Image: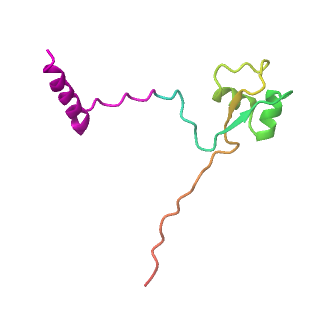
């Protein structure tokens, strides 16, 4: 039985040293929502209300509620984070390349 221990050890070391024999890494859990471009995070402070936070960022209360499912506007807690949508969507216009005369 003692001669099997070195063989098992050798097989284990070969498995570790061989790149193709390593187990695949565990997949990362999917995030529930990807933060959109221009979205900000606001940490709720003492005495803040949803209307005041919305006014501060120039967005509607409804848009904040849509970005924060489960939000209870009458029960904001200090230190909680709110996702704040961008006040204006960023729109980029791409002009067609003009042909320059030669």
Q: Quadrant of residue 25?
A: top left
Examine the structure image and report whether residue 28 is included in the region drawn in magenta: yes
In the displayed structure, does residue 86 sit left or right of residue 20?
Answer: right
Q: Residue furthest front?
A: 2
In the displayed structure, does residue 59 sit left or right of residue 35?
Answer: right
Question: 76 and 26: which one is in front?
Answer: 26
Figure colour scheme: rainbow
Q: Look at the image and give the residue range highlighted in magenta.
A: 1-29
> Does residue 72 sit above or below 15 in this rendering?
above
Question: 61 and 102: which one is in front?
Answer: 61
Q: Residue furthest top?
A: 1
Q: Residue furthest bottom?
A: 102
Q: Quadrant of residue 102?
A: bottom left
Question: 19 and 89: which one is in front?
Answer: 19
Examine the structure image and report whether residue 96 is included in the region drawn in magenta: no
Q: Quadrant of the N terminus?
A: top left
């Amino acid at each position: 039985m003692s001669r099997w221990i070195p063989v098992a050890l050798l097989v284990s070391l070969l498995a570790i040293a061989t790149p193709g024999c390593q187990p695949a890494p565990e997949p990362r859990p999917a995030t529930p929502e990807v933060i959109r471009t221009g979205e900000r995070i606001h940490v709720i402070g003492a005495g803040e209300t949803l209307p005041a936070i919305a006014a501060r960022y120039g967005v509607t209360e409804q848009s904040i509620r849509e970005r924060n499912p489960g939000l209870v506007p009458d029960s904001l807690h200090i230190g909680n984070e709110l996702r704040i949508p961008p006040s204006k969507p960023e729109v980029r216009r791409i002009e067609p390349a003009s042909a320059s005369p030669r």
